[in-house]
Image: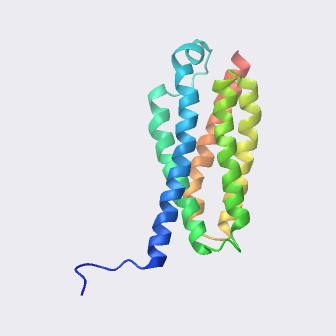
């Protein structure tokens, strides 16, 4: 006799997959943050910025929420077919956009290059849109979890372009 609800093997595997998605997304966030943080008070502060540049304190909470939503979206798509027979392409696009997400921090902040950042973020936005379209075949909630990310990266693209133009 048990004292509480039983968690079967499928539920444990699903929770482990969610944990893995969260770890991967926040690992990307952590590496990107490690590249970005040392440049904020020096190089980035010295750049001319447009009138619509948000305050620096907004980026951390916004990205934390977006990375959590991204992980949950990927997990929801994974759950539709844990064998990866039907959702491999969608999750491959998700992985590719994560790589470009990190590449943007390296290009913009690490290389101190708004131009390189702009080139990377355009590809990133296209990959996010492609991921959303691929996720649509599997889970509509996953799609809606990625829409704010696409919007934020669209805004970041405009900000990146403006910084490039002003500097």
Residue 109 position within the rendered picture, expressed as x and y whole percent measured from the top left: 63, 25
Where 121 sits versus 114, above or below? below
Question: In the image, 31: left or right of 56?
Answer: right
Residue 74 position within the rendered picture, expressed as x and y whole percent measured from the top left: 58, 60
Question: Can the viewer see residue 53 in this picture?
Answer: no
Where 29 sits versus 159, above or below? below
Q: Given the current orientation, which residue lies at the most extreme front position?
A: 1
Question: Can the viewer see residue 115 in this picture?
Answer: yes
Residue 126 position within the rendered picture, expressed as x and y whole percent measured from the top left: 74, 48
State the count of labels. 0
Residue visible at 66% across and 66% down in the picture: 136
Residue 133 position within the rendered picture, expressed as x and y whole percent measured from the top left: 70, 61
Where 119 sits versus 11, above or below? above
Q: Nearer the viewer, residue 149 or 17?
A: 17
Where the N terminus falls, by quadrant?
A: bottom left
Q: Quadrant of residue 61?
A: top left
């Amino acid at each position: 006799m048990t004292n509480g609800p039983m968690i079967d093997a499928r539920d444990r595997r699903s929770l482990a997959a969610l944990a893995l998605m969260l770890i991967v997304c926040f690992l990307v966030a952590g590496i990107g943050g490690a590249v970005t943080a040392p440049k904020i008070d020096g190089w980035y502060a010295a750049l001319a910025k447009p009138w619509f540049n948000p305050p620096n304190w907004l980026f951390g909470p916004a990205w934390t929420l977006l990375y959590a939503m991204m992980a949950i979206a990927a997990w929801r798509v994974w759950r539709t077919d844990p064998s990866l027979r039907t959702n491999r392409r969608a999750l491959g696009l998700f992985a590719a956009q994560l790589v470009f997400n990190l590449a943007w921090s390296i290009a913009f902040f690490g290389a101190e290059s708004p131009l390189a950042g702009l080139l990377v973020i355009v590809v990133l936005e296209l990959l996010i849109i492609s991921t959303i379209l691929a996720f649509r075949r599997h889970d509509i909630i996953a799609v809606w979890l990625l829409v704010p990310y696409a919007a934020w990266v669209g805004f970041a693209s405009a900000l990146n372009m403006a910084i490039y133009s002003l500097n």
